[in-house]
Amino acid sequence: MIDLHTHTVFSDGELIPSELVRRAVVNGYQAIAITDHADYTNIEQLVEAAEKAKYLEDVFDITILSGVELTHVPPAKIEPLVEKSRKLGADVIVVHGETVTEPVASGTNSTVAELGEVDILSHPGLIIEDDAQKATDNDICLEITSRKGHSITNGHVAKVGLEVGATMVVNTDTHGPEDLITTDMARKIALGSGLDEKQADVILSNSKRFIT
């Protein structure tokens, strides 16, 4: 399992990084990105904390990626914060998409889709084909999620993603220990979104790009 979207106590998660990573190791994870909720008020602290968690690579057989999930940032303010995140050293930049379960500002998906520095548009809700195509053109992954609530639109995201040839990835959006999953469960989530077995296997392999 390569999970590119997780949270710790540094935002609204339940675990400190060491416990999150240890539990990921027990679940057979190959790699994990720590991507706490970020905006202009905490971006420096989050990237630094995630980077410090890499000390665990010395004792566990897992790759740890430092990252952030830019969350509920007004669309007009996203691009400079994306650039700042990369300059601070974030390995993975996730942006909180227009999930149907939260009041994310309209225009977030379309703004993110045009930014080349973003890695993943998380749980993008009822994303339209035009935005999915722009994200694809800019090499931004669309997320299929195991997160309760956000997963409501997995089928739509998968359908639109296939239509435009998007790179899709399966992530957990982990907030607590029960949210971590195995590779087998990730595959079932992909299948449950309407993908066939071959497509599911491709999506699970897409995350490898972040650790090679």
Image (cartoon, helix red, strand yellow):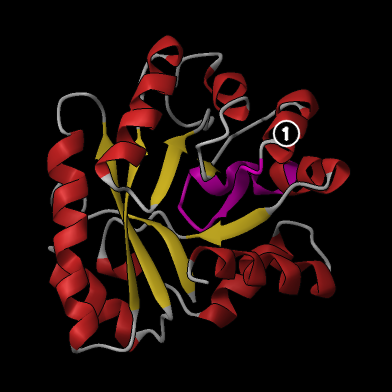
Image position of 156 (left or right of 89) = right
Image position of 93 (left or right of 87) = right
* Farthest residue, direction right: 163
Q: Residue 208: percent from the left, percent from the top?
A: 57, 70
Residue 46: quarter of image: top left
| Element assignment for label 1 | helix
Report the residue at 45% width, 15% height from top. 75
User: Is residue 199 or residue 50 the one in the foreground?
Assistant: 50
Residue 151 inside the magenta-drawn segment:
yes
Residue 28: quarter of image: bottom left
Q: Which residue is mark 1?
A: 132
Report the residue at 27% width, 69% height from top. 177
Image position of 48 (left or right of 76) = left
Residue 199: quarter of image: bottom right
Report the residue at 51% width, 58% height from top. 146
Identify which amino acid the numbered label 1 is placed on: Ala
**Is 119 rendered above or below residue 193?**
above
Q: Residue 33: percent from the left, percent from the top?
A: 36, 61
Image position of 132 (left or right of 93) = right
User: Is residue 19 or residue 208 the one in the foreground?
Assistant: 208
Residue 92 inside the magenta-drawn segment:
no
Q: Which residues are magenta?
A: 139-156
User: Is residue 171 or residue 185 the one in the foreground?
Assistant: 171
Q: Residue 80: percent from the left, percent from the top?
A: 37, 20
Q: Let me know if residue 19 appears in the view.
A: no
**Is 201 rendered above or below residue 101?**
below
Q: Residue 59: percent from the left, percent from the top?
A: 19, 89
Q: Decide: few, some or many residues near mark 1? Use Cα within 10 Å; few <14, some 14-19, many ≥20.
A: many
